[in-house]
Image: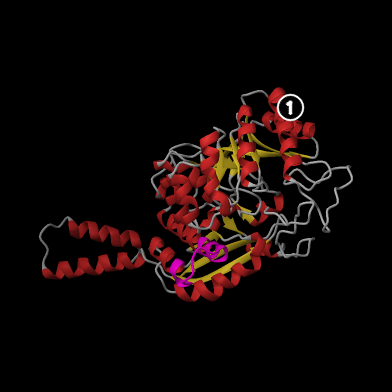
Amino acid sequence: MNRRSILKSIAGVGLAGLMTPREQRAQQAVEKAVRGLARPKIKDIAVIETAPAGVRLDVVKITTDQDGLYGYGCATFTQRADLVKPAVERYLKPLLKNHTVDKIEDIWQTCYDSSYWKNGPVLNNAISGVDLALWDIKGRMANMPVYDLVGGKCREAADVYAHADGGEIQQVIDNAKRYMGQGFRNVRMQVSVPGYQGYAGGGGGAVPPVKGLAAGPVFEPLPYIRRVLKMFDAAREQLGEDVGLLHDVHERVTPNEAVRFAKDLEKYHLFFMEDPLSPEDIAYFRQIRQQCATPIAMGELFNSPHEWTPLISERLIDYIRCHVSQAGGFTPARKIAILGEQFGVKTAWHGPGDVSPIGHMANVTLDVVSYNFGIQEYTPFNARTQEVFSGCPVCEDGYLWPSTKPGWGIEVDEKAAAKYPFTNPANGLNGGWGELRKGDGQIIKQ
C-alpha cells in the first residue's frame, strides 16, 4: 500500500463518522503506517572531501533507510579540513545511526552535548554538516525548498557585494568599476601596502619588501591604515556616493588603533567596516560605538553564543557575519538571525571560497527568510566546482538567488568530487595560516 492510498484510507475512515471497534483498529493501523513512512532513519553518515577550486571542502552526506532519500550538508573547515571527517564518521555517526531524521533540533542538541566541551570549531563544523544534511532531507521529504519550511521568503533574492582587490589604489578602483558595470551595488575594497604583507590586496608589489627582525613577511598597522584612507579618498571621488563600499580590517590592528581608524573612516560613509577587532577584544566595541557612526560588521571568527550574544544584545555592531558552519549549521544560524532582528542588528553571513555551494545555499536561504537581512558576501563558482555541485546559487545583476528545488536544491557528483582530492597547499601547512609578524618580530593576529 503506497503513501497516497494510506492517506486516502485515513480520509475515508475519518469521514465515516461513528466507527466500530474494528474500524477504529483499522484506522489506528493506517495512522501507524503513515507515521512510519514519515519517520525515516539515519542509515549512514559519510564525509565527501573535495577541492575543485583548490580550496578544501568537507561535505556530509546522510543516507536514510528509505531508498533514494538522502541529504547534503556543509562542514567545511579549510584550516583543519582533515579533522572534520573523523569527527563526523568516528564520533557523530555512531551517536546518530538509527535516529529518525525528523527531530533536527533534538539531534543538534544531542551532538552539541556529546563531546562535553562545547563550541570548538571542529565539532561545530561536524555538527553543521549533519544539521544541513537533515534540513536537506526534510525539504526533499516535503518537496519544498528549505526557505518554505521555515516560513517562506520575505524577499526574492539577496543583495551581495563583490571583492575588488589590487596592488595599487587605481587598480582597486578600476576593479570596483568593473563590478559596478556588472550590476553590483556594493564592493569590498582591499589594497596592498608597498613593502608590506597585506590582506586580500596581494603583496607589496614591485617595492622591495620591508625586512623585520624575524624571517618572513612584515605587517605594520600604521602604514596599512594610511594606505586605506588614501584609497577611500580616491574611491569616493571616482565612484561617487551611490555605491556601497566595504573594507575588511581582518583584526590586524590594536584596539586603540581600531577606534581611531573607525573614526577616520566615518567621512567615507562605508556600508560597513569588517572585523576591526579580534574576538578576544570585543569589549572595545563599546568604545567604537560611543565615538563614531561607522557601521561595524563582526562575527566571522565566532564559534560561541558567548561571543555574538553581547554584541547583538547591546547593539554594539550593525551586522553579524558568522560563518554558518563554524556556528554549528542552519539551526543555530537561524536563531542568531532572529536574535539580531530583536535588536536591530542585520545579517551579513560569511561567504568566501572556503564555503561549499551547499553552505552558500544555506546563506542565501537565511538571507531571504530573515527580515533583518543586510547583505551577503559573494564568491563565484568556477567550472570545476559546478561540475561537482549541480544547482549552485545563481548571481545575476548583483543579486544571489536561492534554488526553488526541494531541500537545498544541490546534488553532489561523487565521482567528479573524487577527481579533485585534497592536496597540501604550497605553504606546506596543510591549510593552516602562516606566520605574519611586525617588524620587531612579534606575531600578530590575522
* Residue 127 drawn at (x, y percent): 50, 64
Q: Quadrant of residue 2?
A: bottom left
Horizontally, residue 161 falls left or right of residue 285, namely right
Stretch of the chain drawn in magenta: 112-128
| Residue identified by numbered label 1 | 234
* Residue 334 drawn at (x, y percent): 44, 50
Q: Residue at x 36, y 63 (%)?
A: 38
Q: How many marks?
A: 1
Is most of the magenta stretch helix, strand or loop?
helix
Q: Is 237 a magenta residue?
A: no
Q: Residue at x 78, y 65 (%)?
A: 428
| Label 1 crowd (10 A; few <14 / some 14-19 / many >=20) | some
* Residue 144 drawn at (x, y percent): 43, 50
> Quadrant where the N terminus lies?
bottom left
Q: Is 125 a magenta residue?
A: yes
Q: Amino acid at mark 1?
A: Ala
Q: Residue at x 18, y 58 (%)?
A: 14
Q: Residue at x 25, y 61 (%)?
A: 9
- Can residue 158 be spotted in the picture? no
